[in-house]
Amino acid sequence: MKKFKFFFFLCFCWLNSISAQNKFIFQNKKQSDKINFKLINNLMVIPVEVNGVELSFILDTGVSKPIIFNFLNVSDTLKIKNTETIYIRGLGDGEAIEALRSRNNIFKIGDAIKLRQDLYAVYGLDINFGPRLGIPIHGIIGLDLFKDFIVEINYAAKYLELHDPNTYKYRRCKNCEAFRLEFYNDKPYLNAHVKLREKKIPIKLLIDSGGSDSLWLFEDDSLGINSGDRFFNDFLGHGLSGSVYGKRGKVASFYLKSFELKKANVAYPDSTSIVFAKKIKDRNGSIAGNILKRFNVIMDYPNSLITLRKNSNFRERFSYNKSGIEIAHNGVRFVKEYEPAKYRTLGNEESSLNRNGVSVVLNRRYKMTLKPAYAIVELREGSPAHRAGLEKGDVILSVNGKSTHQLTLQQIMVMFYGNTGKLIKLKVERGNKVLGCSFKLESLL
């Protein structure tokens, strides 16, 4: 009997160990951790260590398994083993993409670690979102982190806190709104309302922290969900299966219970880009980063809850790109940079002496350095930039007299979201030619 009990005890411990390896666990006693993130184009970028290699991942509630963009030599650098080839697909009008599925990888996020993590490595430079954000992005992670913790996201201060669900205690919050989460294919949905042409319509939305837009709606005339006559056609984003195009407009109001966002941006993606997304029963669209960032959020997958509280971003004006161009980091280019003036004491060299017998000589030298190149990757037909003669592939050298090598991608893009009528002067490189052009930002809504 004693041997049987001892054997049972060993088996129980072994099963608990296996269970722990299949989920994220904390390596500290407080069973929580705080992690800073970068907010780039409304997307959260967090540090993730994969098999001992430090990487940057987008935190995306819309993905089930971690995806790594395979521009690394994954076999050597990340020591990926136990692989098999599969095909996955996401938003976009392209085909399913080839991916390498790998098991038993070690993931570490702050003080949280998981010892047996599946991941998918996808191929092709077009899959890498880094150039469109202007910083290195190595992958995407979502469900595996959210299902094991209660995650507090402070968009205003740019940090998140991970908590053990067994020890977490909610604080009373009079100014919060809580929503019941529904899950389909391991992805979270909530119910909200939108006002279109004076009609308030109930909608079910995917919570998509990996989308930089505000609100996406799937057109459905039977429900009164359509763009009406106030919209323009535009590039909406880049998904795993290619580019997504559609219509852009405004809604009269978007409601999350008592929270009302007036004149929020909305996009209506082309049906060809969302064929698989529309198969989810009763789904009407997505709520993405440009709305989520206006709240501090508690994501509680274990109890199927999301809690929202307005933050300092709540009243930020909804704007959109009025230029008609999208740019991305596209390799590097040589830039001539002048070094600072040098001051030195002369010996027997010919000079004009000052009262201290020291001559100041301006030694103006320059050096050639490699700097990021920013190229036009999308161009809306009929837009101000298009009418000014710009073309896809043009490399932008300066904006309003400021050299682009002194700016980040985000700083350049912000200029295109400015007030209607703002003058934009660009200098671009096309082949071996340097061209100048100018246009004014136009409102199409």
Image (cartoon, rainbow, N blue to C red):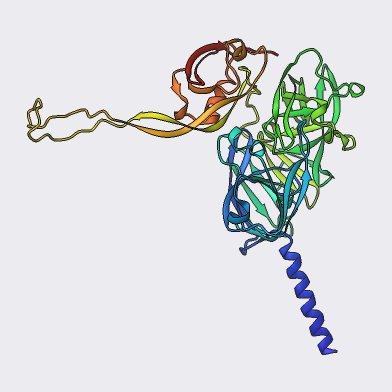
Q: Is residue 385 left or right of residue 171?
A: left
Residue drawn at (72%, 21%) of the image: 263
Residue drawn at (78%, 43%) of the image: 88
Judge whether 186 appears above or below 276 on screen. Answer: below
Q: Is residue 374 left or right of residue 19?
A: left
The quarter of the picture where residue 212 lies is top right
Q: Position of residue 99 (x, y in %)?
A: 73, 47
Nearer to me, 105 or 155: 105
Nearer to me, 126 or 208: 126
Q: Position of residue 97 (x, y in %)?
A: 75, 41
User: Which residue extends farthest right?
Assistant: 222
The quarter of the image holding the C terminus is top right
Residue drawn at (81%, 22%) of the image: 195
Nearer to me, 138 or 202: 138
Q: Position of residue 101 (x, y in %)?
A: 73, 52
The quarter of the picture where residue 26 lies is bottom right
